[in-house]
Image (cartoon, rainbow, N blue to C red):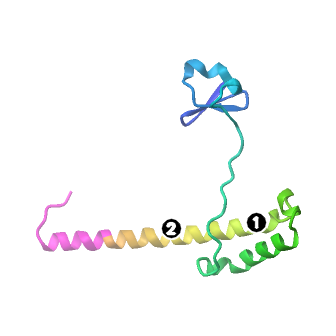
Amino acid sequence: MAAARGSWFVVGGCASRHAVENETDGCCDIGAVRDTTWVAMHPNLALHIHPVCQEFILALQECHAENKYLKYVGACNDVRLELDRCLKQESRVRRELNLQAAREEKERVRERMKERGAKLD
C-alpha cells in the first residue's frame, strides 16, 4: 500500500518518485530512496549570530571536543536538543518581530498612497 508524501510515494518503506501506475515497483527502482526521518542540521553556530543561545552552542562544542567518537552514537544528543529548542525559540521571536515590522511597513505604505490619492483595493 502506498502513501503519498508530496510528489513522493512511499511503498513498503521506500520512497519512489514514480507515477501512481508504477507504485508497486518499490525499492527495486534505481531512483528509489529509503524512507527515513530527515533531520536538518542546525544553522551556522557562530556566537555573534545567536547571542541568546551562546551557552548551548558552547556546551555542544565542548561535548563534541570531549566525546570525539561517542558524539556519533548520541553522546551529545541531549545538549543538541537543548540547542535546537533555543534556536527554534529564537526563530519564533525573530519571525514575530519581522511580521510586526512588515505590517507596520504595509500600513505606512498605505498611508502614503492615500496621501497621494491612489486607489487601493
When the figure is inspected, residue 39 is found, relative to residue 5, above or below; the finding is: below
**27 sits to left or right of 114:** right
Residue at 58 percent across and 31 percent down: it is 17
> Dividing the picture into quarters, in which one does residue 65 lie?
bottom right
* Residue 113 visible in the picture: yes
Of the numbered discs in the image, which one, if any, rests on residue 95? 2
Residue designated by label 1:
80
When the figure is inspected, residue 37 is found, relative to residue 15, above or below; the finding is: below
Residue at 81 percent across and 62 percent down: it is 77
- The magenta stretch is 106-121
**100 sits to left or right of 66:** left
Q: Quadrant where the C terminus lies?
A: bottom left
Mark 1 lies on a secondary structure that is: helix
Q: Quadrant where the N terminus lies?
A: top right
* Residue 1 visible in the picture: no
Q: Residue furthest front?
A: 30
The dominant secondary structure in magenta is helix
Mark 2 lies on a secondary structure that is: helix
**Number of other residues with Cα within 10 Å of mark 2, as a class: few under 14, some 14 to 19, many 20 or more:** few
* Mark in the foreground, 1 or 2: 1
Label 1 is placed on what type of residue? Arg
Label 2 is placed on what type of residue? Arg
